[in-house]
Amino acid sequence: MAGVVFDGPGSTALRQRPVPVPGDGEVLVRIAVTGICGTDRSIVLGEFPASPGVILGHEAAGEIVALGDGVTGPAPGDRVVINPTSYCLRCQPCRRGRPAHCTEKVGREIGVDCDGTMTEYLAVPQRYVHRLPTGLTFRAATLVEPLACVLNNLRCADPRPDDQIVIIGAGPIGTLCAHVLIARGARVSVVDRDAARARLAHAILGPVPVLRHGGCLADDLRGGDRPDVVIDTTGVLLEQALDVIECGGTVVVMGEREGASASLALRSLVTRGISVRGAGPYAPADFERALTLADKLDLDTLVTHVVPLDRYPEAFALLGLATSADQAPRRYQAMKVLLACDPGLAAR
């Protein structure tokens, strides 16, 4: 089978690997489609740690084709989505009901330090696969994992019904945040410095204001009410978010950038009653809630391109990503880009 292998920062290749054999308690999934996540982009850019030689990808849906010993429930032919966030159920956090903070994840993070979903087949423990509702397409199902991230962070933000919410970043995660908040009737606006992303988000979100971020968030939002909640999906604009947040407001740092840092004026933080929060990884229950909600949202609108696996450099280029060190940097041209690992299955 073919897989997109990470060789190191700035370097990837399509390589052949043996089709995995499902072990005890595992199922073998034929991958229909897999999404290209911001984390995948950060890995290739050297901004997020990953193991060289690993197959990338963690947002995927497909069909079960084989079962390992001891599997009960899932069956060949089941349409499923994969939860890539592992949990052991044995460590102290897992035993205390906090599997999102499982201490045994090292070496088991799909697409980071063990082989991921940018390939044709993946063997995973049966607890990580969830059957798709009848009406949910494989394309839409690839967004269940990012939707779980969104639901986890929105719970952390804990907005009130009348709060003004600003989302920094109009990529798939920021746009998905806004999508969910709109469905809840919230007051929300989105800012992004990239004109193409802002335009694409505006086409998806309709009447929601999508503002061009000119480098200074305070200038972007001048003339409007200070936001009660800011969700920074970029992970690098905490200081600017603190400049614009209303007294008693909440800033959620959602984006993850290795090495990103910020300087905080602690007295202002205390006297203004500001909360700065990090939600951490989502829990299994968040993934299940996301799957239920996905059937009610029009997630297909976020998918702008589906590219065959063997043409993955074209897919990466749509997201401003070069696949080798000798390629020039590109600009964003898409919202959510999927790789069709099995084009026939992906079309169903």
Image (cartoon, grey):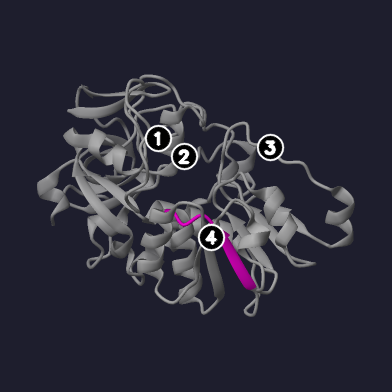
Identify the element where label 3 is drawn: loop
Image quadrant in which you'd find residue 144: bottom left
Q: CA distance from mark 4 to mark 3?
A: 21 Å
* CB under 8 Å between discs 4 and 3: no
Residues rendered magenta in the picture: 164-171
- Rendered image: mark on residue 175: none
Q: CA distance from mark 1 to mark 3?
A: 26 Å
- Please give the residue where the numbered disc 1 appears in the rendered image: 110
Q: Earlier in the sequence, mark 1 or mark 3?
A: 1
Nearest to viewer (mark 2 / mark 4): 4
In the structure shown, which secondary structural element does the residue marked by tag 2 occupy? Answer: loop
Q: Position of residue 104 (x, y in %)?
A: 54, 31
The disc placed on residue 86 is: 2
Q: Tell me the CA gap for discs 3 and 2.
A: 27 Å
| Marks 2 and 1 close (CB-CB < 8 Å) | yes
Q: How many marks?
A: 4
Q: Quick one: quadrant of the N terminus?
A: top left
Which of the two discs, 1 and 4, sits closer to the camera? 4
Residues at marks 2 and 4, CA–CA distance in whole angstroms:
33 Å
> Is residue 291 something one can see in this rendering?
yes
Say which label, 2 or 4, has the lower sequence index: 2
Q: Nearer the viewer, residue 329 or 312?
A: 329
Q: Which residue is mark 3?
A: 261
Give the residue type that dot 1 points to. Answer: Ile
Q: Secondary structure beneath disc 1?
A: loop
For residue 20, say whether it is visible.
no
Residue 191, numbered circle: 4
In the rendered image, the vertical position of residue 344 relative to residue 249, given as above or below: above
> Magenta stretch: dominant SS?
strand
